[in-house]
Image (tube, rainbow, N blue to C red):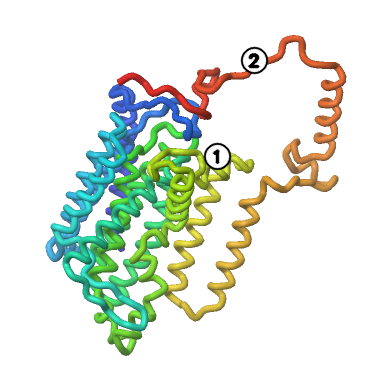
Amino acid sequence: MREYLLTLCITAAVTYLLTGPVRKFAIVAGAMPEIRARDVHREPTPRLGGIAMFFGLCAGLLVADHLTNLNEVFEKSNEPRALLSGAALIWLIGVLDDKFEIDALIKLGGQMIAAGVMVMQGLTILWLPVPWVGTVALTQWQGTLLTVALVVITINAVNFVDGLDGLAAGMVCIASAAFFMYAYRIWYSYGIEAAAPATLFAAILMGMCLGFLPHNMHPARIFMGDSGSMLIGLVLAAGAISVTGQVDPDVMKLFSGSERNAVHQMVPVYIPLMMPLTIIAIPAADLILAIVRRTWRGQSPFAADRGHLHHRLLEIGHSHSRAVLIMYFWSALIAFGALAYSVNAASMWIVLGVVFLSALGLVLLLLPRFTPRAPRWAEAFVPPRYRRGRRAADAAEAALAAADGPEPEPRTPVTVGVSGANGATAVGPRSRSAR
């Protein structure tokens, strides 16, 4: 555990220290695109934050290779090298997209090639544990297709949710923390060495996100861009593929009585790992809804819009920071709820706890719909906008202003796409910058 924590800290430190210089480089390189119609921020912000995250990944793998226990992962498995190869390719495609905005189909092809590179080096799904059936061996083509599909879907799910400051990095960090606890339990408790690479990937992924978050929290000083969102999506998918398709449940039959019972007992957490979209269910739901919405309108599934879940949270009245925290809450509830259920599926307290927290999350979602009314004795302890006397004064002032008539010099509304005092607006279409 100490070596995993050291790897995590080194990765986070390298990512954090490099993000500042990368921001200056992005500004000099002109990687500050115009504000698009779907964007929430109001000031042009540099991208290319994925450069710092990629070098953090390289630093984490380099440190792990020189540690006593983690060095065995590199000696017994080729998966770390496969991850680095695929990550380098997807990172390069993301950097080019952050600078030149390449076509969506080209990015999709690059994602499939990156997944294929990892498959060629051994990071692939060899078998699947099926409930009440046992272990189902996959042919080479079946494993390749399933691996590529999982990588592409996970990358785009993370990319879709990258719409608010700190949202994607925080949600992936939460998912990777739950993933690390599960993979470490498989490796340490059951003594299954095949789970060690996935544990290492999760620790490095947490370090990448934690090192980048201080620069990316609202108001963000730099965005990770596609070079970062596609990179962390690929690392998350690689860990899930490693522990799902490489760990044979038959190894655990000594602890569970038989292979079929072992698979059945591991179902609550094997399903989330076979489909990483479940452990990052919020981005997955956003991805599915976006595809359905755009296809229903006759648009391309890759066409951008302002219909994502985080956009809807802002529309119903949540602030930027509150919307991000609510998405964090639901991600943690789903990820750690699945983790707790996998440890003790027979505990009713876990189910009741998840139900209670789900109800609390629904209340938080609908909070702007309620008009808070603080009692008289508590008005001194709440902000002025929640005081009845303050609301009455505001209503009287509005009525007085209406009685006096319109202002002598009415304000001219700012048209869409015109820069104001705080920068360009983030609503409506904008002209593309000349290349």
Quarter containing the N terminus: bottom left
Mark 1 or mark 2, which is nearer to you?
Answer: 2
Left/right of residue 266 with respect to residue 107 in the rendered view? right
State the image quarter where residue 48 is shown. Answer: top left
Amino acid at pointer 2: Thr
Percent coordinates x, y for residue 413 in the rendering: 63, 18
Q: Name the residue nearer the viewer: 378 or 22.
A: 22
Left or right of 290, for residue 92: left
User: Residue most toward the front?
Assistant: 298
Residue depicted at 48% across the width and 27% down the height: 429
Q: Gap between marks 1 and 2, in whole Å?
A: 27 Å
| Rendering coords of residue 4 (x, y %) | 29, 59
Which amino acid lies under the numbered mark 1 shown in the image of this protein? His
Mark linked to residue 286: none
Height in image: 75 above or below 94?
Answer: below
- Determine the residue positioned at 84% across, 36% down: 389
Query: Which quadrant of the structure image shows residue 176?
Result: bottom left
- Disc nearer the start of the sequence (1/2): 1
Residue on which disc 1 sits? 320
Q: Is residue 128 above or below residue 114?
A: below
Q: Judging from the image, what secondary structure is the residue with disc 2 in?
A: loop
Q: Check disc 2 and report the residue beneath it.
A: 412
